[in-house]
Image (spheres, helix red, strand yellow):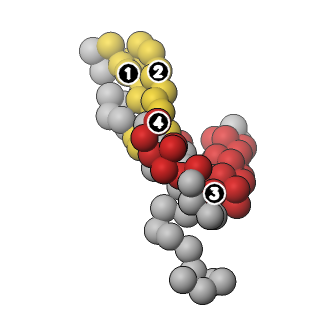
Amino acid sequence: MNANEHMTCYGNLFPDTLHVSNDRTKKGKVFSCTLHTAGGLYRAGRDTGVDLAEWDQCTQCPEFENCYKLSLAKLTLQVAVSNL
């Protein structure tokens, strides 16, 4: 791997929160979320998840610190765009 190449999971610790479908789990490499509906009519709840085995694996990766920063930046941008 050279300086311009990264693992395919790089920057994807969190799911894409802009494209979450109701009642389906959306997964990132480590974190996940689900939007639950009641009868398909209204939001009944939200769940988040963490895959600790993946987290442990990620923290051992030499690119973890920058991957984590990029993942947070992408998540922050998704939140900002969803509030427009």
Task: Give residue 57's position: percent from left, percent from top.
Answer: 48, 50
Of the image marks 1 and 3, the number of the one nearer the N terminus: 1
Q: Mark 3 points at which residue?
A: 64
Looking at the image, residue 21 sits to the left or right of residue 31; the answer is left
Looking at numbered disc 2 in the image, what kind of residue is underneath it?
Arg
Of labels 2 and 4, earlier in sequence is 2
The vertical placement of 47 against 21, above or below, is above
Residue displayed at 51% across by 44% down: 56
- Circle 1: is it few (<14), some (14-19), or many (20+) Cα within 10 Å? some
Is there CB contact under 8 Å for labels 1 and 3?
A: no
Identify the image quadrant of the C terminus. top right
Spatial CA distance of label 1 from label 3 is 31 Å
Residue 1 appears left or right of 73: left
Distance from disc 1 to disc 2, alpha carbons, whole Å, reads: 6 Å
Gap in angstroms between the C-alphas marked 2 and 3: 28 Å
Residue under pointer 2:
46
Question: Could you tell whether 26 is left or right of 30 in the image?
Answer: left
Q: Residue at x 47, y 21 (%)?
A: 46
Residue 24 in the image: above or below residue 40: below
Q: Are marks 2 and 3 in contact (CB under 8 Å)?
A: no
The answer to whether 61 is drawn above or below residue 42 in the figure is below
